Image (tube, rainbow, N blue to C red):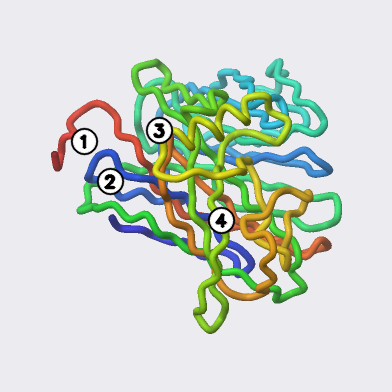
């Protein structure tokens, strides 16, 4: 598999990974696609998601919003874009492209992810970006994730890494995981995430210091859940019974370790570890859907950033799926 990384900022990276279920795709996060994925957060933060239809034809789109705090329940609406049309969705006050209310009103502390899909066809007609502005003064900004289908030689690799350090007084992190399932049999292509036992990613985490000495951490599960979700015990039991390993923690978000904990006081990938500069090694053990990780670093004041990389584990019915089979 060919991976293309777009390094926009020095403070953080975004890594999205999966086991490949069909060969023949090289996917670029910054390329136009038929579907875009964005993170949003309204917990003492504001989020703005910008969408552009770069096609010469008008496009109808389906917007799905998954709120982690509300057991990953979905809100959705449809919108229309003319050719070369751009619109910004303020997640605090979501209006459609024509300026009318969409009918979706999120709770003040909502957070999760947004999926935007072209309703008519699979084509590279959408590009976008999102901004998450924290009340303390820093922001995360990066391109929305898109999927571009390109034939390429591919294989399966399950080890991934991201660097981190405390330069610029970085002391907080937001390791955000997005997991969902795509159902290509429905029109438009529907994404689901609330069923935790069918949408999760199990990972083995290790941290390496600057001398490349590894420190073993623990297994973690990413899913669209917080610690109050009544389905959380069922998810932990399901993974233990159906995966190659188990974990005692599952969450939508984590901090890195004790040196750079989570911005909102959440669970850590590597509790008890205090390495302030190095890299996190992620080994994909099993997954029950498409999975991804946003890695954000900030200094709790005026500095924070995101970057992006993406490749997926689903393939749509049609000749592309059978290209290398």
Foreground label between 3 and 1: 1
The residue that appears at 46% across and 37% down in the rendered structure is 126
At x 48%, y 25%, the residue is 191
Q: CA distance from mark 2 to mark 3?
A: 25 Å
Q: CA distance from mark 2 to mark 4?
A: 31 Å
Along the viewing direction, whichever of 257 and 140 lies nearer the viewer: 257
What residue would you read off at disc 4?
A: 218
Q: Which residue is mark 3?
A: 56
Q: Secondary structure at mark 4?
A: strand
Residue 191 vs 302, above or below: the answer is above
Q: Locate residue 230 relative to residue 118 in the image: left or right.
A: right
Location of the N terminus by quadrant is bottom left
Task: Looking at the image, tell me whether mark 2 or mark 4 is earlier in sequence order.
Answer: 2
Q: Is residue 88 left or right of residue 239?
A: right
Tally of marks: 4
Residue 53 seen by the camera: no
Disc nearer the start of the sequence (4/3): 3
Residue lying furthest bottom: 211
Residue position for label 1? 320
Q: Nearer the viewer, residue 59 or 232?
A: 232
Q: Which residue sits at x=15%, y=39%?
A: 323
Estimate the x, y position of residue 131 in percent, counting from the top left. 68, 47
**Residue 25 got which mark?**
2
Image side of residue 122 versus residue 102, left or right: left
């Amino acid at each position: 598999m060919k991976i293309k990384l777009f390094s926009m900022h020095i403070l953080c990276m975004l890594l999205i990974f999966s086991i490949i279920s069909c060969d023949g795709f090289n996917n670029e996060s910054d390329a136009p696609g038929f579907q875009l994925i964005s993170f949003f957060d309204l917990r003492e933060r504001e989020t703005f998601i910008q969408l552009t239809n770069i096609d010469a034809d008008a496009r109808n789109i389906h917007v799905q919003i998954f709120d982690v705090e509300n057991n990953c329940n979905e809100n959705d609406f449809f919108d229309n874009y003319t050719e070369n049309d751009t619109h910004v969705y303020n997640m605090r006050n979501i209006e459609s492209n024509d300026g009318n209310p969409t009918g979706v009103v999120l709770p003040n502390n909502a957070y999760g992810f947004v999926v935007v899909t072209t309703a008519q066809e699979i084509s590279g007609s959408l590009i976008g970006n999102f901004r998450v502005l924290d009340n303390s003064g820093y922001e995360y900004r990066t391109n929305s994730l898109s999927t571009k289908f390109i034939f390429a030689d591919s294989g399966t690799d399950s080890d991934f890494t991201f660097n981190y350090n405390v330069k610029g007084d970085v002391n907080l992190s937001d390791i955000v995981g997005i997991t969902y399932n795509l159902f290509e049999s429905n029109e438009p292509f529907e994404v689901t995430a609330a069923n935790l036992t069918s949408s999760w990613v199990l990972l083995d985490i290790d941290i390496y210091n600057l001398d490349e000495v590894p420190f073993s951490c623990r297994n973690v599960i990413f899913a669209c859940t917080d610690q109050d979700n009544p389905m959380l015990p069922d998810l932990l039991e399901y993974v233990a019974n159906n995966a190659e390993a188990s974990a005692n923690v599952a969450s939508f978000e984590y901090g890195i370790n004790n040196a750079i904990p989570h911005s909102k006081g959440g669970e850590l990938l590597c509790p008890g570890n205090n390495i302030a500069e190095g890299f996190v090694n992620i080994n994909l053990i099993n997954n029950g859907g498409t999975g991804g990780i946003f890695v954000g670093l900030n200094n709790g004041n005026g500095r924070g950033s995101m970057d992006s990389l993406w490749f997926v584990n689903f393939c749509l019915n049609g000749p592309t799926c059978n290209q290398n089979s």
